[in-house]
Image (cartoon, rainbow, N blue to C red):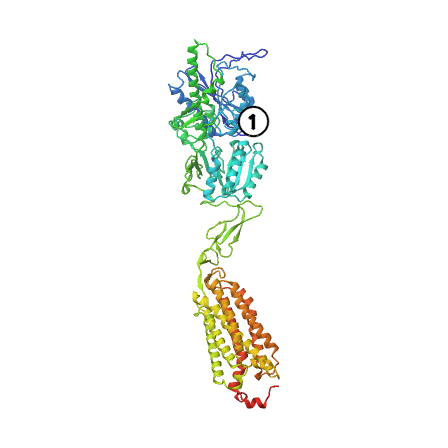
Amino acid sequence: MFFQLYFFLLLQLPLSVGREVGTSCHTEKTFSPTYYRDGDLVVGGFFPLLLYKMDKFPYWKMFWFHPKDIMKHHQWQPRHYYQVLALMFAVEEINRNTKLLPNMTLGFHILNAYHNDERTLESSLVWLSGQGPTIPNYSCERQGKSIVVIGGATSELTVAMGSLLELYRFPQITYGLFDPLLNDPVQFPSVYQMAPRDTSLPFAMVRLMLHFKWTWVGLVASDDSRSEKFIRDLQEEMVRNDVCVAFIQKIFYDVTEDDGYLSYFLKKLFCSTARVIVIYGNTDTLLTLRFSKVPHTLLYRMWITSSHWDIAKKPGYVYFDNFHGALIFSDQTSKIPGFKHFLKTTKPAKYPEDIFLQNFWNSAFGCASKIGKGDEAVCSPNASLDALTLSYLDMTMSHQSYTVYSAVYAVALALHEMFLVISEMESNSNGNNSGTYPWKLHSFLKNIQFNNSAGNLVVLAEKKNSVANYDILNYVTFGNDTEVLVKVGEFVSEAPAGQQFIIQQKAIVWPRTWGEPLPSICDKVCSPGFHIKAQEGSPVCCFDCAPCPQGQISNQTGKDQCMKCPEDQYPNMERIHCLPKRVTFLAYEETLGMALASIAVCFSLLTFLVLWVFVKHKDTPIVKANNRDLSYILLFSLSLCFLCSLFFIGRPTATNCLLRQTTFGVMFTVAVSSILAKTITVVLAFRATRPGSKSRRWVGSRAPISLVVFCTFIQVMLCAIWLLLSPPFPDSDTNSDPENIILECNEGSLIAFYSVLGYIALLALGSFTVAFLARNLPDTFNEAKFITFSMLVFCSVWISFLPTYQSTKGKMMVAVEVFSILSSSAGLLGCIFIPKCYVILLQPQKNTKKFLKNNPIS
């Protein structure tokens, strides 16, 4: 258990000692104002600071009760004496004010406090009964009875005292953290809270986390109701802003001195990946963490806390800089005029009865205030409190001392108003209303409202407590065993949105192993080119880094989602930047386009050359066989089929998009229908050789040409409907090739496109079937066999074209169609006409009637 000071403020008035039947005070002992020095009296429990009013004596006196066993066996916390100094300063200032409580002087008692409900109740009873036996409902104080209490640095202490003090309606003014539970007028009607509401503290801390991108934070708190509520509110605020809790660790008061528990606690901190830890709670339960020999690994942590936890080092402590670089949210206070001068002039010689000041002086300066106290050197007479470090006190008033200062003034002003009313009532009733009781002060305290010497408004009304604003302080330690608090920011809850939080990042001194603000995250930050992928069953801050999908980039670290590149851009290999896409199409300038165009022109010229050979030898039997006119039409259409492939090469325009498929469809229809007509001619010629055959009249007629015209007319109508309803148009494909924008012709209506191809396929299938059936019929030069083989090649090309065409994209799709046009046209040309040209040009002796007579067809 650690030694600690709490304060009670009491008013002493001339009251008689109470007495009941069967109970008496020990009147043989006088309880007069006595100065108790070290060793004179040992008292258990807590010993509050009492402020009382003496209207019979023109001076105030200080009574110090000091338990010797506490000083022997418990740690001495010198900084708590700083609140005593604030109380002393307020009392002296009020006593010098002739307008406030005239002809009256304030005095006070200072008592210690145990963090134990039973001892608190026992000490409260001692205080109520006087310095003698603890007799309920009796007071053996001859000097009068106090009626106001200032205390309750924690809610637990206030509740423990209130269970007894409430029986007498004693006003309790607490200077600790604001607690909504104590604001209940039904359960705690006599409790007044001086501290402002700290409901904005969770929001302020989360705002700090967001500023430095700390999303993986540990929480440490003492085991009490107030800390639980704060942790709950902080968690809710963290969830709203996607900040995750790495762990929550409670510190229990009764096990803080257990080395096993401390080792477990430190191991949990060491094993956590959280670089930032919020620590909150009352000082009692957290002191062991501060004073224990904590390993240097804690230096890797950034601590965020409130000023209610005393983060300053213990004097002489080796690992004093474990919290170097911590950020502290401190309630904003104003400077009290004259307080700094008061600290400089405060010395043990000025207050010889103040044994706490003597002990404080000895501890702070490492010397003895009097001669003959051990082997320590006597303190220098020039020693001053302004030379002390942060370990002992601040030279500007802290928030708790500021609250104690305001509380003293609130009581003094309430008493002033009460005495004015009492004086008026006594004058009206001829002095018969002289009784003053604790409960009479409530009506004045509830309505008290004033500006203190710093110019700040002080209100005790239960529903008018202001919301706290905070200074953000940076705790910095130095190698010469000194420490300072540096203001690096502030949080003003009433400020407009966006202006509430101010931080000077360059002014912050970070933990020794940091050197700069480091991130506190569950997992490593996803680098550019990756995005966050949530882990199933883990907090939102714990994730995996997944590469950006195809077509998306991430140019920043820690991105939740990747973003798509514009349609005219594509990601680079690392998927960090978008690069402009190249515009591409099957151009004449590239190798493939140039090769296909050259092949098309060469085959077209070759076809015209064959046509010239046939025209030159038009009277020979091999040309005249199987309808010479159909051969001319077929050769001419094949020549155009080769040339129509040129519409597919080059930059797509509206004109060639309209002409490429329609020209191809019509020309191939003419060619295939001519082959169909030639095949039918073979069948008719065979049937005409039979005696009495009616097919004789069709041989040599214009019927085959009419068939070509009819079949072509149907294809022309299909193409016309296509062009009227949904014509092809120039388009660009940005999806097929991630690095290129492919210029192409959109077919408009796929139904029309496949109808044109289907019609050609139907004619080709008919030609193949008829030629296959007539392949063994007697024929001059056996043309039916050549047609069968040519149609087999033709059908094979276009059957393989369909799946290949569907599986390719971009300009390769166009190249596949051009290749199919050229190969199928070349197949027809080669299979049907090359054998005939071979006979005409290389074996002319076979192309005569004489040869045919000598070699009749069997």
Assign the N terminus to one quadrant of the image: top right
Q: Which percent across, then down, holds residue 600?
A: 47, 74
Q: 792 left or right of 354?
A: right
> SS class of the residue under badge 1?
loop
Q: Is residue 735 visible?
A: yes
- For residue 730, what is the image quadrant? bottom left
Q: Can residue 483 be seen in this view?
A: no
Q: Closer to the camera, 336 or 808?
A: 808
- Does 260 appear above or below 816? above
Q: What residue do we see at 47% from left, 42% from top? A: 210
Q: 766 left or right of 594?
A: right
- Does 475 appear above or below 717? above
Q: Which percent across, then down, holds residue 57?
A: 43, 14
State the count of labels.
1
| Mark 1 Cα shell of 10 Å, populated few (<14), some (14-19), many (≥20) | some
Q: Closer to the camera, 233 or 522?
A: 233
Q: Closer to the camera, 447 or 706?
A: 706
Q: Which percent across, then down, holds residue 845?
A: 53, 89
| Amino acid type shown at disc 1 | Asn
Q: 853 left or right of 664?
A: right
- For residue 807, what is the image quadrant? bottom right
Q: Closer to the camera, 804 or 139?
A: 804
Q: Name the residue under label 1.
A: 116
Q: Which percent across, then down, holds residue 664?
A: 49, 70
- Does 223 appear above or below 564? above
Assign the C terminus to one quadrant of the image: bottom right
- Does 270 appear above or below 252? below
